[in-house]
Amino acid sequence: MEISVKAPAKINLTLDVLHKRDDGYHELEMVMTSIDLADRIDLVSTSQPSVRLRSTSGFVPQDERNLAYRAAALLKENYDVKPGVFITIHKHIPVAAGLAGGSSDAAATLIGLNKLWNLGLTLDELVELGAQIGSDVPYCVHAGTALVRGRGERLMPISSPPACWVVLAKPEHGVSTAEVFQKFEQVSPDNSPDTKAMVAALEQGDFSGICASLGNVLEDVTLKSYPTVGRIKDKMKEFGAEGVLMSGSGPTVFGLVRQEARARRIVNGLRGFCRHVYMVRMLGQLDQNRTK
Ligand code: C5P
């Protein structure tokens, strides 16, 4: 028995840190949306009881450090599943990039194994399990466009952005989310994004309003350590992206563009000095039945 699941990347249209919590995590408020840049997860149920994993990318761990591995192990343990699984991750989303690639692989593994092993878990139950794996996993189980709060586990579906192009550029280095949060000390309301304005712009399908409301309080932290991020932002704007922001804890920068021809021009311009450049569509809402 085999199943394939799509694991799309996300971008943050907003990311705000409200305060540091007693458990060491940060209380967040973010608007996230799925983009059409995805890994594919193949799951094969095996009579041998172990979890095994391989990835087409050398940059991801192939053992219990991998979040998809942890998702399978968690399901096996919680629901006393006898069969094992062989997980293959066809990696397309850049690693340690602020695009939730690892979290999305874990979410897709939860969704796929729920089906493959006939566990009958609801989406809400999968979201809850996701929170035990990592802060971005609950959103990735849900995918689509959502207002995300708490540590990342409180989700409210909201309207998706209108169809547009997303140009992504990732500097060579990856970024550690834990390190960025550690360096983020001061919660200053001055540079907080206007989350309400973003939600309203999405409701109205107001592309310019969405571009004007993009904001991420972690941007300054990553920019200080990696000036390349700032240079990529400047170039994207100069080449004509209508809205530009760093996603998550970075270092990937994205630009929103309405017209395909303009998006292509931006890609060509960026390729001159950045090796990892992508041009994808905004995905909007995701079909919950994303298995094959
Ligand atoms: O939950 P996850 O392991 O993905 O988070 C990675 C790191 O990011 C955490 O160890 C923590 O340092 C930081 N983090 C945080 N507040 C959140 C989410 C993540 O401080 N809401």
Image (cartoon, grey):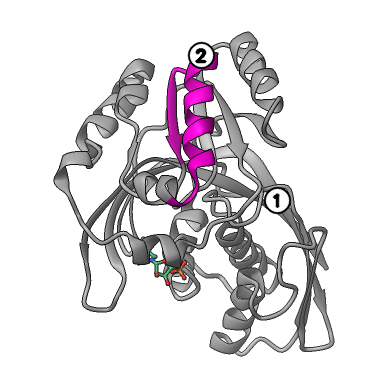
**Which quadrant of the figure contains the N terminus?**
bottom right
Residue 222 x/y as whole percent: 43, 50
The residues colored magenta run 225-246
- Judge left or right: residue 86 versus residue 5: right
The answer to which of 192 and 136 lies nearer the viewer is 192
In this figure, what is the number of numbered marks? 2
The answer to which of 292 and 52 lies nearer the viewer is 52
Residue at screen point 31% across, 23% down: 212
Q: Which residue is mark 1?
A: 39
Q: For the residue marked with disc 2, what is the amino acid? A: Gly
Q: Tell me: residue 114, above or below residue 166.
A: below
Whether the magenta-drawn stretch holds residue 227 is answered as: yes
Residue 18, quarter of the rendered image = bottom left
Q: Which residue is mark 2?
A: 240
Secondary structure category for the residue under label 1: strand
- Judge left or right: residue 191 versus residue 244: left
Residue at screen point 66% across, 63% down: 112
Q: Tell me: residue 205, above or below residue 140.
A: above
CA distance for labels 2 and 1: 29 Å
Secondary structure category for the residue under label 2: loop
Residue 253 x/y as whole percent: 52, 37
